[in-house]
Image: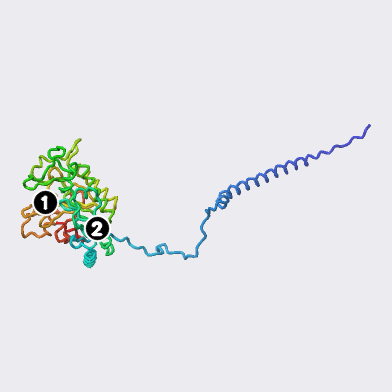
Amino acid sequence: MAKRYKIKRYDKIYRSSNRNLIRNIAIWGAVLVVLAFVGFAAYRPLVNFLNGVYTGEKPPTSQPVQDPGQTGEEETPPQEEKAPVYARVSLSDLADEAKIAETAQRLEAAGITRAVLPLKDSEGLVHYNTGVATAQAAGAVAAGGIDLDRVVSIFSEKGIEVAAQLSAFKDPLVSRYDKTAAVLYKNQAGVLWLDNTAKAGGKPWLNPNAQSAQTYLKALCAELGQKGVKEIILADATYPVAAFLKDAGYGLSGGTTAQQALQASLDGIAQSAKESGAELSLYYPASPWMLAEQVNGVDYRALKADRLYVDVGETGVPNGTKVGELTVAAGTSRQEVADAVRAALEGKTATSPLYCTPDGVSVSGQEETVPPLS
């Protein structure tokens, strides 16, 4: 009988091999996880580095730690813009280069920072070297007008800004030249309305609602701003006040009121001024324009502009005018009139009013002086 061999079982060998295999898989899995994490974390900085983009923290500086209450530099408090100090300048004082320089020196010594020049009068004459074609074609450029470019240049060297006063719609020259721009007699095309009889010297007016009138004034304001004028002050920014107003035709249509048409006209003119760097202000005498609820269908207190000037001088408020509790008389001081007008207009104007007196003195405690326009 053959000899039997005893078979030994090494089951521990297989158990050991299985454990080693599982351990190796776990180790390699952990390695792969670590590599994946490191790769993910390094990917963006590496790409940024290769692209020349630095996203790390800035290296620390050697500056000492500041006290939380300190800012490192002393903060300069914001400077309040000072209101302009005005003076009216006669055109005769600007007739040539020597007079311009002399006038600028005098204004600087007096502390004036804004000079008001009357550059378009109520006769329609323009008193500077305008290039506006309508003014030239209508014969509206005054002989001996000033060189506004030189005035602005010389004044600016002394820290003085230029403001231009223009008569807006009281303009018989352009009204006659371009009848589409004028107030018409009963809205009849080509027939001018006059503010008095022809025999008595009646004159036509520009129509605030006429596109051609607006275009002319816009062109002047744009030109003035481009020449360096900082403020344009419109006088006579009104419908006419005269006899025979019932015959005056403004071409209003579609339910547009006289108030709406005038404000729209002023808004367009203001936009032209603004685009060229100038403010648009309105100037009215205190009576009747600013003391009555309506003058020929318009509440002038409700008009909007950058600034509003109300003349409270002797020519602005005639004797006998009642302003609130005050009746203006020969002995009434300008200060008293100014205070009464201020009280009467309190809360009633769309634009904050500044009050003018003929000699430019400040009124009612205001720090600034305002243009002596009357």
Q: Nearer the viewer, residue 286 or 54?
A: 286
Examine the image and state in which quarter residue 259 appears. top left
Instruction: Tell me the SS state at disc 2.
Output: helix
Q: Nearer the viewer, residue 207 or 361?
A: 207
Q: Mark 2 highlights which residue?
A: 148
Instruction: Tell me the SS state at disc 1.
Output: helix
- State left or right for residue 129 relative to residue 52: left
Q: Mark 1 highlights which residue?
A: 287
- The answer to whether residue 220 is above or below residue 365 is above
Where residue 325 sits: x, y (%)? 8, 53
Where residue 11 sits: x, y (%)? 78, 39
For the residues marked 1 and 2, what is the alpha-carbon distance in whole angstroms?
A: 33 Å
Q: Please give the name of the residue rendered at 12% of the width and 43% of the height, measured from the top-left corner.
A: 296
Observer-side mark, 1 or 2, equals: 2
Whether residue 352 appears in this view of the structure is no
Kind of residue indicated by mark 2: Leu
- The answer to whether residue 218 is above or below residue 189 is below
